[in-house]
């Protein structure tokens, strides 16, 4: 039987009430890895924008102590511990500068500067704050959500570790330390390309859990209005295996196979674009957005992004968001 936690336990990990309730429904979890996998799915696919903002608001500013009346004393305790390195490496001048930049950041973006502060010094955090301050609000909102997920994963590890300390002794399922496993898993999700070279090409990593969402996903953000883009048609295709590789400047009519299509919802996320598979077929993919229908007065009638998935990446998840305005677009590979 898995470990049983209640809503207040999960609120200590993430300040979103929706997140905590969904985690209770998804549990109990046999291992902390199962809990982390469920947490990612819930945070990125079930918690809405208001839930993200609620979670952000639960955090104190970097360099400040959580309020005594915080709704989760455990959250406040962990938050203080995570900032210990920053506080121990600060001076009166750097703390004052951090306070000023925190105020600038909140004034521009409307929420607290969020970063996984564990093990980071004050100068390091301050430098990152200054860099991220230059971002557009919609981009920074996504980055903050990613940072919240890092914090949540680390705290889930603490939650399971504390449970293990108070539970009767049982035969361990693995000889690997729980906290170390959580950190390895976090690094893999955030930067899987860094670890791909250390494992045999095509070999399934033992710590990758079964998927709960398709391996290729997307969402569209309308940067001109500062909100998700609802109703954008999206199509995912794959290049035929038996054809020569598509080349820049060449015109192809029948070289692409359609995998699926959908339209974005009120959160800007598309529906399922491909079948739920554990391992991706390595190859060249194309994801296209009907931006002209979404904004007839815009500059782009449609947008297509072509990318290649290698043999060593077939176990990874590829999130390909589109940041859209009438006269500019940008994208990046998310987790």
Image (cartoon, rainbow, N blue to C red):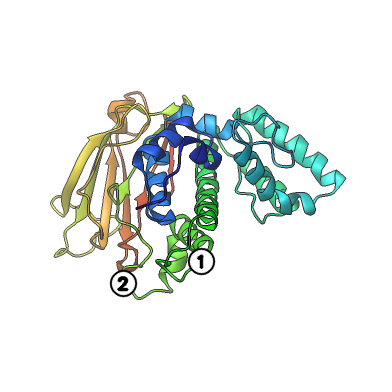
Indicate the position of residue 66 as horizontal and vertical percent values: 69, 36
Indicate the position of residue 68 as horizontal and vertical percent values: 71, 32
x 30%, y 32%: residue: 264
Disc 2 packing (10 Å; few <14; some 14–19; many ≥20): few
Q: How many marks?
A: 2
Q: CA distance from mark 2 to mark 1?
A: 23 Å
- Taking the image as drawn, is residue 223 in sight? no
x 29%, y 48%: residue: 212
Residue 203 numbered tag: 2
Vertical placement of residue 137 versus 117, above or below: above
x 21%, y 47%: residue: 274
Q: Quadrant of residue 221?
A: top left
Residue 270 numbered tag: none
Indicate the position of residue 56 as horizontal and vertical percent values: 57, 34
Which sits in the foreground, 332 or 194? 194
Q: Is residue 75 left or right of residue 101?
A: left
Disc 1 packing (10 Å; few <14; some 14–19; many ≥20): few
Foreground disc of the pair 2, 1: 1
Label 1, secondary structure: give it: loop
- Taking the image as drawn, is residue 275 in sight? yes
Vertical placement of residue 287 versus 172, above or below: above
Label 2, secondary structure: give it: loop
- Give the residue pinned by disc 1: 177
x 70%, y 32%: residue: 67
Which sits in the foreground, 71 or 309? 71
| Furthest residue in direction front, as rendered | 168
Of the image marks 2 and 1, the number of the one nearer the N terminus = 1
Indicate the position of residue 194 as horizontal and vertical percent values: 47, 65
């Amino acid at each position: 039987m898995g470990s049983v936690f209640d809503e207040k336990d999960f609120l200590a990990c993430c300040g979103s009430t929706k997140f905590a309730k969904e985690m209770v429904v998804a549990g109990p979890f046999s291992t902390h890895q199962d809990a982390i996998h469920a947490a990612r799915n819930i945070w990125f696919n079930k918690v809405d924008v208001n839930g993200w903002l609620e979670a952000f608001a639960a955090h104190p500013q970097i360099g400040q102590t959580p309020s005594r009346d915080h709704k989760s004393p455990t959250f406040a305790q962990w938050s203080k511990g995570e900032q210990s390195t920053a506080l121990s490496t600060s001076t009166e001048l750097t703390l004052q500068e951090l306070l000023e930049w925190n105020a600038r950041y909140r004034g521009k973006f409307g929420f607290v500067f969020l970063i996984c502060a564990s093990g980071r010094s004050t100068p390091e955090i301050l430098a990152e704050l200054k860099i991220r301050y230059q971002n557009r609000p919609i981009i920074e909102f996504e980055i903050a959500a990613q940072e919240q997920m890092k914090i949540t994963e680390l705290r889930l590890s603490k939650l399971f570790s504390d449970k293990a300390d108070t539970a009767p002794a049982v035969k361990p399922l693995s000889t690997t330390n729980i906290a170390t496993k959580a950190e390895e898993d976090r690094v893999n999700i955030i930067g899987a390309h860094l670890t791909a070279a250390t494992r045999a090409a095509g070999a399934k990593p033992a710590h990758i859990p079964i998927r709960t969402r398709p391996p290729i996903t997307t969402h569209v953000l309308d940067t001109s209005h500062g909100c998700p883009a609802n109703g954008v048609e999206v199509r995912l295709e794959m290049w035929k295996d038996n054809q020569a590789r598509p080349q820049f400047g060449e015109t192809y009519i029948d070289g692409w196979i359609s995998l699926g299509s959908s339209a974005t919802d009120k959160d800007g996320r598309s529906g399922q674009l491909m079948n739920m598979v554990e391992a991706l077929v390595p190859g060249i993919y194309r994801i296209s957005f009907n931006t002209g229908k979404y904004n007839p007065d815009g500059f782009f009638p449609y947008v297509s992004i072509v990318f290649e998935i290698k043999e060593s990446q077939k176990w990874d998840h590829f999130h390909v968001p589109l940041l859209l305005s009438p006269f500019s677009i940008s994208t990046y590979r998310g987790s």
